[in-house]
Amino acid sequence: MEQSVVIQEGYTRLKKTRTLFIGGLIAGLVILIGVAVTLGSADYTVAESYIAILAGLFPGIFSAPDLATTIVWDLRLHRVLFAVFAGFGLAVAGSVMQGILRNPLASPFTLGIASAATTGASIAIVLGAGIAGSEYLVIANAFLFALLAALAIYGMARYRGIGSETMVLAGIAIMYLFSAVTSLLQYVGSAEQLRAVVFWTFGSVDKSTWPKLGIVSLVLACTIPYLLYRAWDLNALAEGDEVAAGLGVPVERSMIVFMMIASLITAVIICFTGTIGFIGLVAPHITRMAIGGDFRTLLPASGLVGAVLLLAADSIARSVLAPQIIPVGIVTAFLGVPFFIYLFMHRRDA
Amino acid sequence: MALLSVEDLSFAYRDREILSRVSFPVDTGEVLGLVGPNGCGKTTLIRCVDGMLTPGSGRVLLHGRDLRDMHRRDIARAMAYVPQSAGNQTASTVFETVLMGRRPYLNWTVSPADEEKVVEALAILDLGGLALRKIRELSGGERQRVMIARALVQETGVVLLDEPTSNLDIRHQMAVMEVLSGLADERGLAVVIALHDLNLAATYCHRLLVMKAGEVYGYGEPEEVLTPDMIERVYGIEAVVKQDLPAPYVVPVRPGQLREGA
C-alpha cells in the first residue's frame, strides 16, 4: 500500500509541475507582451503605451494622443500578437510532427514544408508578380506550395507504406528538390528579385497586419482544440504505430489528419512570415525536457514556449539595432541555437 | 463458444503467401503458445488477429463477433496487444506509459480509479519502484515488462503477446510467464503468446500451435506436439525430448551426435 501512495503522490506532483509550468509561461508571456508593445522607435513611455492601448479598446473612458494610439495599434500591437500566435502555432505543429513521426528532428522545416513555401514565394516573386506585384500572390503561392509538399510527402509515404521513417526521408528529399527550384529561380531572377527572395527566406513578422493576424488566429482556433481533444491518440501514436493500433487508434487515418493539420498551421503562418526556423524544432524539445511528453499538457505548453521565444526574439530584433530591424529568423537562430545546445549538453533526456 | 476463434485465416503480401488457412480456438483461461522458426508467420498471425492487418480470407471471431464488424475502440477493449519491440524510448514516465493502456476507456481526464489500476498492474509486474522513472532510463527487459503492464490495464479478455520474453533473463522470463498464466487462471484471460523458447512454451502453455512457412504443422497439448519428429520437420534439427519432467523438455543435439551415441 505504501508504494502505491508514493506512486500516486508522484504523479500528482508531476501534474502540479505541469500546471505551474504552464501558469508561469502564461504570466511570462503577458509580461513580455506588456514590454514588447512599449518597444519601438517612437519614444513613448510604458504608461503612455498602455493608455494608448486602453484608449483604442475603450475610447470613451481613456484618451490618448491620436498619433500614439495609431502607432501602438497600427504598428505594434498586431505585430506583437502576430509573433505570439505564429510562435504558438509553429511550436504546436512541431510537437505534433515530432510526436507522430517519432523523430526528434521532425519539424515543418526538416520535412520540406518550409522550403516548399519558399519556392512558392520565389515563383510568385520571380515569374509571377515581380517585386512590385501583389503581395497576396506571394502569400497564396507560398501557402499552396507548403500544402503541396505536405501532400507529396504523404503520397510518397503512402505508396511505400506509411512508416514514420519513410515520411521523414520523403520530407528531406522534398526539401532538397524545392531548394534546387528556389536556387534556379534565384539564378535566373534579376538582382532586385533575388533580393526579394532572399529577404523572404529570412523570415520576419514585419508584414503583419490585423487581417493576417485574424486569419492565423482563426486557423489556430479551429485546429488546436481538436488536437487537444485527441491528445490521447497523439500520446498513443508517439509510442508507435502498433501500440496505437492496439489501443484502438485508427493509425493511418489519424496520421493523415494530424500531418495535414500540422501542415496547415505551418503553411498559414509561414506564408505570412517567410522562413522562421527553429521555433518548431526547439520549443517542443524544451517543453518535453521540462514537463514530459503527455500531449494534453505538451501541446499548450510548447505553444506557449514557442510564443515566448518568438516574441522575445522579435523584441530583441527590433531593439538591438533600432531603428534598424533585424529579421527575426536570424535572431531566433543566434540566440536559440546556443541555448538549445546548452540544454542538450546538460540534460540528456530531451 | 471459444472466446477467440481464428478460422481459415490466410494472408499474402503481394504475391507471397505468409499465412495459409490457419485455424485455432482459444478459450477463456487458456494460454496458447505460437511456436515455429523465424519468419514462419507468427507476428503476421498476431497482427491479423488483432485486426492491424486485413487477412485475404478467413475470419477472426471475438466473443462470437466478426472482427471486421467491430469498431477499433471496441476491439481494444476486448483484446490487448504487446508488440515485439520493447517500445519507444520516450521521455514519458513508466506510470504514464502504462496509463496509456486506459486509452480505450478514457475521454480526456484520468480518474483516481484509472490511476489505481495502473498502480495495481505495476505491482503485478514488479515495476512499482520504477513508476516515476522515464522509459528511456530503463533496460530493455524493464521496458518489456512495462508494455505487458500496459496491456493489463487495458482490462481485456484476450491478450496477444509477440515474444514478450525475448529481452528478459531467465528469472524474468519465468516471472512474466507466471504472471500471464496466473492471470489466465484467476481472471479467465485468453492468452496468445508467440515464443521462441520451446521449453518455456512447454512449461507454461496449455496448448501449442506449431507453424512453418505460414502453415499449421501441429496443434495440441505440449506433450502431443513436441516430438523429435515434429522438431525435425519444423526446424530441421535433431532433438531429444525428455518426457520424465513436469513438462516435455527439448534438448537439441548436433547433427549425427545421436547416431554416434547409439
Image: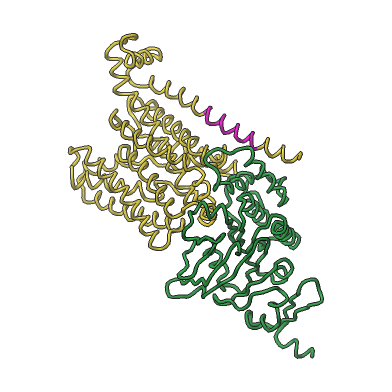
Chain colours: A yellow, B green
Q: Is residue B186 found left or right of A126 in the rendered image?
A: right
Q: Is residue A305 found left or right of A10 in the rendered image?
A: left
Seen from the viewer's position, the closer of residues A329 and A250 is: A250
The total of numbered circles placed on residues is 0
Quarter of the figure with residue A196: top left
Q: Position of residue B207 (x, y in %)?
A: 68, 70
Q: Which range is magenta?
A: A11-24
Provide the major secondary structure of the magenta segment: helix
Please tell me which residue is depicted at 30% across the width and 23% down the height of the picture: A75
As for residue A23 lying within the magenta part, the answer is: yes
Q: Position of residue A299 (x, y in %)?
A: 48, 38
The C terminus of chain B lies in quadrant: bottom right
Seen from the viewer's position, the closer of residues A245 and A334 is: A245
Q: Residue furthest front?
A: B1
Please tell me which residue is depicted at 55% across the width and 37% down the height of the picture: B109
Q: Residue furthest right?
A: B244
The answer to whether any part of residue B41 appears in the image is yes
Please tell me which residue is depicted at 30% across the width and 15% down the height of the picture: A68
Q: Position of residue A207 (x, y in %)?
A: 29, 32
The answer to whether any part of residue A202 appears in the image is no
As for residue A146 lying within the magenta part, the answer is: no
The N terminus of chain B lies in quadrant: bottom right
Please tell me which residue is depicted at 48% across the width and 54% down the height of the picture: B71
Q: Is residue B86 found left or right of A176 in the rendered image?
A: right
Q: Position of residue A241 (x, y in %)?
A: 50, 55
Quarter of the figure with residue B247: bottom right
User: On screen, B231 above or below A110?
Assistant: below
User: On screen, A206 above or below A174?
Assistant: above
User: On screen, B26 above or below A154?
Assistant: below
Seen from the viewer's position, the closer of residues B181 and A183 is: B181
User: On screen, B227 above or below A55?
Assistant: below
